[in-house]
Amino acid sequence: MSQGFILLVDDDLHVLKSTAAWLRENDFSVTEASSLSTAHAAIATETFDVVISDIRLQEGDGFELLQQAQKLQYSLPVILFTGYGTLETAVEAIRLGAFDFLSKPLLDDELLKAIERAVAHKINEEKVTQKHSRRVDSIRTNHFLTSDPNMQNIFDVIDTIADTKATVLITGESGTGKSRIAREIHQRSSRRNGPFIEVACGALSETLLESELFGHVKGAFTDAQVDKFGKFHQAEAGTIFLDEIATASPAMQVKLLRILQDFQFEQVGGSQTFNADTRVILATNENLSDLVEQGDFREDLFYRINVIHLELPPLRHRTSDIPILADFFLEKLSDELGKSVDRFSIPAMDLLKTHPLPGNIRELQNIIERAVLLGKSSEIQIEDLPEKIRYSDSVSAAVEIIPPVKRQTLKQALEGPERKIILNVLNGNNWNRNETAETLGINRTTLYKKMKKLGLETPRVAIEH
């Protein structure tokens, strides 16, 4: 059994080959890289326990590799070595985050002890990180947990536009976190100390919505016994979030268009004009472009609110976030419900990652709350999950898409669904082959052979559907 996976980098082929052979004799799995570009590619596509690299390389230096390792694999220890070692070089290596610094020629005992310390350090770091939510470095906010590249891009946009008054439209399926994104924009803006007012437009009739947003004067309608300020008054110097905006009536759309253009409004039944000093964020789970074409939504309002458009992907398109969110909800709900449940079994987590979760984050939270309440141990088991997950037809669906082929052997027929399943798991694990092999319950060598046989050798196939 391997003691760990090592990336060894040195452009001196003699040192590279001899050191790699010695490491394999000591039961380590070794990937060799004789150039900086090869090493960069290996770190980007593989998971390692330790990187051991010469500082002086023809294409650059080991410090560049160290920076990439810190960016892509936050807990990956990097051991640097050089034949031109000085105290200043050693200090610089440690300052930049190297786990250890060694001098050539590499001494067997010294190198072995450094590797053992590095592996132990990585295991300890991952245990601490896993307790809080897995990959803490990828958690961008107290309100939203993610490691998905598309979501990270959304947060980059938020960082750019948060401290402006630009109108933001957030779209996405129900349960994808549109309200939390709106709060995040507010929290990252200079209006963070002002109020954040949320209005569910679809929950109110046209009359009540108008009064809720703009307020009313006494006698404006039957139940208007006193003057009342609306949400735009309450959101002064803050942010107002209008959810389910697609449900607004044509008359309400006209009023919203005016306030977004002029930032002025009147109370229902009143004649006094008020100025609105508030940031407006809107959200919907419907396709507004389609509604515009159908004549159900004003085109001028659509273009006015579509200044900054953030489209949240469904959870099934960012499956790498499922373990992060699941761990967060587990810890939160266990505390709230007074239950001592602190982890998922591997099969239970695998099922969660393959379930399509049409209700997205909200559904995931409900599933975990049920599991915590009904679970009988400190670990969430398969039987603690709802039947719709335990008896998911996702595998059957993968089989059904394979068309019949004449004169096809059983082995050939099975390759289709096998390829689909492996591809889905690879995509879900961001093409991390170690995690994919673990998820599928096979060793990494078997996975590599299957990928080669099924034409899945490069991430290019990740765009297949």
Image (tube, rainbow, N blue to C red):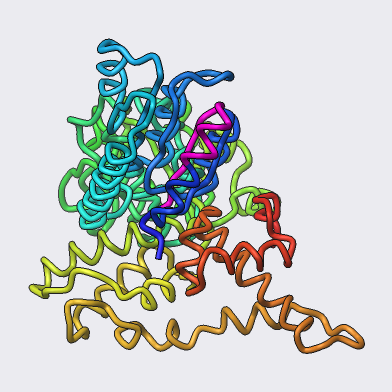
| Relative vertical location of residue 168 with respect to residue 457 in this rendering, above or below | above
Q: Kindly indicate the quadrant of the structure image that contains residue 425.
A: bottom right
Q: State yes or no: residue 328 in magenta.
A: no
Camera-side residue: 82 or 143? 82
Camera-side residue: 170 or 80? 80
Residue 211 appears in view: no
Residue with the most extreme left position: 338
| Relative vertical location of residue 62 with respect to residue 7 in this rendering, above or below | above
Residue 450 appears in view: yes
Image-based side of 217 in relation to 47, left or right: left
Residue 205's x, y, as percent?
Answer: 38, 60
Residue with the most extreme right position: 406
Residue 445's x, y, as percent?
Answer: 57, 64
How many numbered discs, if any? 0
- Residue at 11% of width from left, 66% of height from top? 335
Image-based side of 177 in relation to 452, left or right: left
Camera-side residue: 250 or 391? 391
Q: Which residues are magenta?
A: 5-19
Residue 66's x, y, as percent?
Answer: 40, 29
- Residue at 47% of width from left, 32% of height from top? 258
Q: State yes or no: residue 12 in magenta.
A: yes
Image-based side of 406 in relation to 92, left or right: right
Image quarter hosting the C terminus:
bottom right
Residue 78's x, y, as percent?
Answer: 36, 35
Camera-side residue: 4 or 256? 4
